[in-house]
Amino acid sequence: MAQQASEIVRSAPRGPRLRGLAFRLLGSLDETDTAVRQASEREGSSDETDLAVARLCLDTLSRRAKAPRDDWHVPDLVVTTADQHTPEQLELLAGSVGSVLYVTLDALSAHERVAFVLHDGYGLEVDRIADVLGLPATAVTALTDRARAAVGEPLAPDGDLRGQRAVLDAFFKAVRAGDEDAVRSMIRPDAVLRADAGGHAMSAVVEGAEQMARRAVMLGRVRSTSHHVLINNAAGSVVTAQGQVAAVLAFTVVGGQVAEIDEIAAPVRVAALGVEALLR
């Protein structure tokens, strides 16, 4: 049913663009498809559909605030290969932001988040954002300024995909060898890992090179294989064990070192990413 609904959204007028907008606001593929489908049903293909999507995302974020996510929650990932980008994936990639920014956005109020993304991310006029939020333009400006101060300057990942993959290759080689010192040397001191294993004991936020290296080497004792993919248009890895996908890992590489790892290992979430087809 979910897949059928998603196909309807993708084929809707302006569906890909609207999905990019909703995904940037929500960081959730299921919630993105729900918002775009409902907005399309209400507004059709009119110019008001963008605003309708934003309002629905605001409602979703407001509901989310009443049931905060665990610290280790990882936003949905867009997994592709270098030569396999569908138009829908390109729109999602254009709308995605780094996982660390999603984590920062989660700390904002729903109104701050929508104001910031629409203004700084999409260049929407303050008056139109005010219409979405139901607030005066002066309040929107204040919300945007407050959110911008909270977000600060995001990390600037290395732009060379080949260089990113070289770092990942060296990282996994050291992990397989059980060389904790080598693994630690490849991780920035202020790095962070978020692992979503579906509430399992391995779900965690791990901070710092020493703790991250220790965890990686411990998990590396399980015989596994890493496969190159693109995740949110940067180097990432799908890890398989005994022929099954065990985890999907998004890396942020800064200055030739690992600055962030976002890991999805929850079986339900891994299955929803559909990465098996990319490994064939």
Image (cartoon, rainbow, N blue to C red):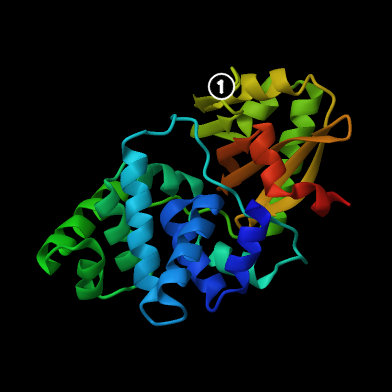
Q: Residue at (40%, 51%) from the top-left corner?
A: 154
Residue type at mark 1?
Glu
With 27 as the anchor, is 9 left or right in this view?
Answer: right
Q: From the top left corner, tell me how far across and down residue 224 is, in percent.
A: 83, 30
Q: From the top left corner, tell me how far across and down residue 45 is, in percent.
A: 46, 81
Foreground pick, 178 / 110: 110
Q: Secondary structure at mark 1?
A: helix
Give neighbour class at mark 1: few <14, some 14-19, many 20+ (Cα, 10 Å).
some
Q: How many marks?
A: 1
Q: Quadrant of residue 210?
A: top right
Question: Residue at label 1?
Answer: 210
Q: Residue at (84%, 50%) from the top-left corner?
A: 279
With 48 as the anchor, is 86 left or right in this view?
Answer: right
Foreground pick, 167 / 110: 110
Foreground pick, 82 / 36: 36
Q: Is residue 277 above or below residue 244?
A: below
Q: Quadrant of residue 169?
A: top right
Foreground pick, 108 / 1: 1
Q: From the top left corner, tell me how far across and down residue 120 is, in percent.
A: 32, 65
Q: From the top left corner, tell me how far across and down residue 96 is, in percent.
A: 51, 58
Q: Residue at (43%, 47%) from the top-left corner?
A: 102
